[in-house]
Image (cartoon, rainbow, N blue to C red):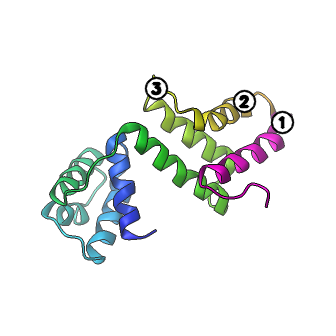
Amino acid sequence: MTPNDTLEMLAAEAALGLGDAERLTRDAVELLTAGFDSPALVALAGLSGDDTSEARALRDRAMAEMSIATPSQREATILLAREVARKIVDGDLPPYDGAERIWSLTLRVHPERIHDLDPFVYAASEWESRPGDRPFFENAIMNEARALIGEDCTT
C-alpha cells in the first residue's frame, strides 16, 4: 500500500469511527517516513499504549492539519469494502471472514443500504446455518470480491 493509499484508508476509517491504536500508530510512522508531516502525526507516531480514543483523536487532528478530506460514510464504506475485497482475492483473508468484515462495515451506514455489498451480507449471514452450502458461498464471495475491485470474474 502506498502512503497515499494509507491516507485514503485513514480518512475512510475516520469517517466511520474506526481504527485501533496499534495500527494507527504504525500508519503514522509509515507516513512520517514517506515525508508527510504534522504535529498531530508526530504525536500519533510516538503514542505508546493502546488508548484507541486518543489515537483516533490524534489521527483526526493530523488529517485536518494535512488538509485531508474525510469522505462521506457511504464513500468510506465502499472504499474500505474494496480493501477487504482485495485481501480476499489476494488470499490474505478467508472469504467468509472478509464477508463478515464487509457486513460489519455496512452496519455503520445503517439505515442506508449499499446494494453492491448485499451479496457479502447475505453470504455472511447464511454461512453458519448452511454448512453444506459453504463452498457455494465461498465461491460467490470470491466472485463478488473480484467484481468489487474490478477484476474479471472468469479467470
Towards the viewer: 79 or 14: 79
Please state the horizontal and vertical placement of residue 138, each as a whole percent of the image. Answer: 76, 45
User: Which mark is drawn over residue 112?
Assistant: 3
**Mark positioned earlier in the residue sequence (2 or 1):** 2
State left or right for residue 140 relative to residue 99. right
User: Which mark is drawn over residue 19?
Assistant: none
Q: Which residue is mark 1?
A: 133
Residue at 64 percent of width and 55 percent of height: 88
The type of residue carrying mark 2 is: Glu
Real-space CA distance between mark 2 and mark 1, rounded to the nearest whole angstrom: 9 Å
Rendered view: 141 above or below 23: above
The dominant secondary structure in magenta is helix
Proximity of marks 2 and 1: CB atoms separated by less than 8 Å: yes
Q: In this picture, which residue range is highlighted in magenta?
A: 131-155
The residue mark sitting in front, 1 or 3, is 3
Few, some or many residues within 10 Å of mark 2 (<14, 14–19, 20+):
few
Quadrant in which residue 63 is drawn: bottom left
Where's the C terminus, which quadrant?
Answer: bottom right
Q: Which residue is mark 2?
A: 126
Residue at 38 percent of width and 62 percent of height: 6
Real-space CA distance between mark 2 and mark 3, rounded to the nearest whole angstrom: 21 Å
The residue mark sitting in front, 2 or 3, is 3
Q: Give the secondary structure at mark 3.
A: loop
Rendered view: 51 above or below 110: below
The type of residue carrying mark 3 is: Glu
Residue at 76 percent of width and 27 percent of height: 129
Few, some or many residues within 10 Å of mark 3 (<14, 14–19, 20+):
few
Q: Is residue 151 visible?
A: yes
**Mark positioned earlier in the residue sequence (2 or 3):** 3
Is 79 part of what is drawn in magenta?
no
Please state the horizontal and vertical placement of residue 117, each as a whole percent of the image. Answer: 59, 37
Is 145 part of what is drawn in magenta?
yes
